[in-house]
Amino acid sequence: MTVDPPEFDPELDGHTSAVIGNVCHAIISEYDESGHSYSATECGVRLEDSLFSNDRVQKSGPKHDFTDDADIEMCDDCWPEDVI
């Protein structure tokens, strides 16, 4: 059986994102010293609660949900131009 890999997403549109303070951040999973996972932004903001119940997160979803919103900026550290 052959499995085709998913298509590469050069704009990272499908990557999970969260809007915090009107700035769209890329969300990643990290692990603490005891091996428990938690959500954080690519630029280093740790989200203590789950992504969907965190008080700091205004909205979450794929990046393309926020790219056309004039009120939301893209975090330069999470979405660097050399990657996108």
Image (cartoon, rainbow, N blue to C red):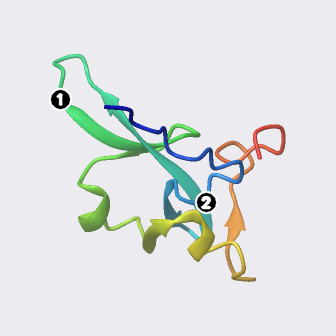
Graded by Cα atoms within 10 Å as few (under 14), some (14 to 19) or many (20 or more), the crowding at tag 1 reads: few
Q: How far across and how far down the image is residue 63, in percent? A: 58, 64
Graded by Cα atoms within 10 Å as few (under 14), some (14 to 19) or many (20 or more), the crowding at tag 2 reads: some
Instruction: Identify which residue is drawn at 62% across, 44% down.
Output: 8
Q: Which mark is residue 66?
A: none
Quarter where residue 25 is shown: bottom right
State left or right for residue 34 relative to residue 24.
Answer: left
Instruction: Identify which residue is drawn at 63% across, 52% down.
Output: 12
Three-letter amino acid code at disc 1? His
User: How far apart are labels 1 and 2 at the CA level?
Assistant: 27 Å
Q: Is residue 22 visible?
A: no
* Label 1: which secondary element: loop
Residue nearest the viewer, comparing 81 with 2? 2
Quarter where residue 32 is shown: top left
Instruction: Identify which residue is drawn at 28% across, 47% down.
Output: 48
**Rendered view: 34 above or below 44:** above
Residue under label 2, please give it.
13
Three-letter amino acid code at disc 2? Asp
Quarter where residue 39 is shown: top left
Q: Which residue lies furthest to the front in this view?
A: 1
Q: How far across and how far down the image is residue 42, in percent? A: 54, 40
Q: How far across and how far down the image is residue 20, in percent? A: 51, 64
Q: How far across and how far down the image is residue 73, in percent? A: 72, 67
* Label 2: which secondary element: loop
Q: Residue 36 carries which label?
A: 1
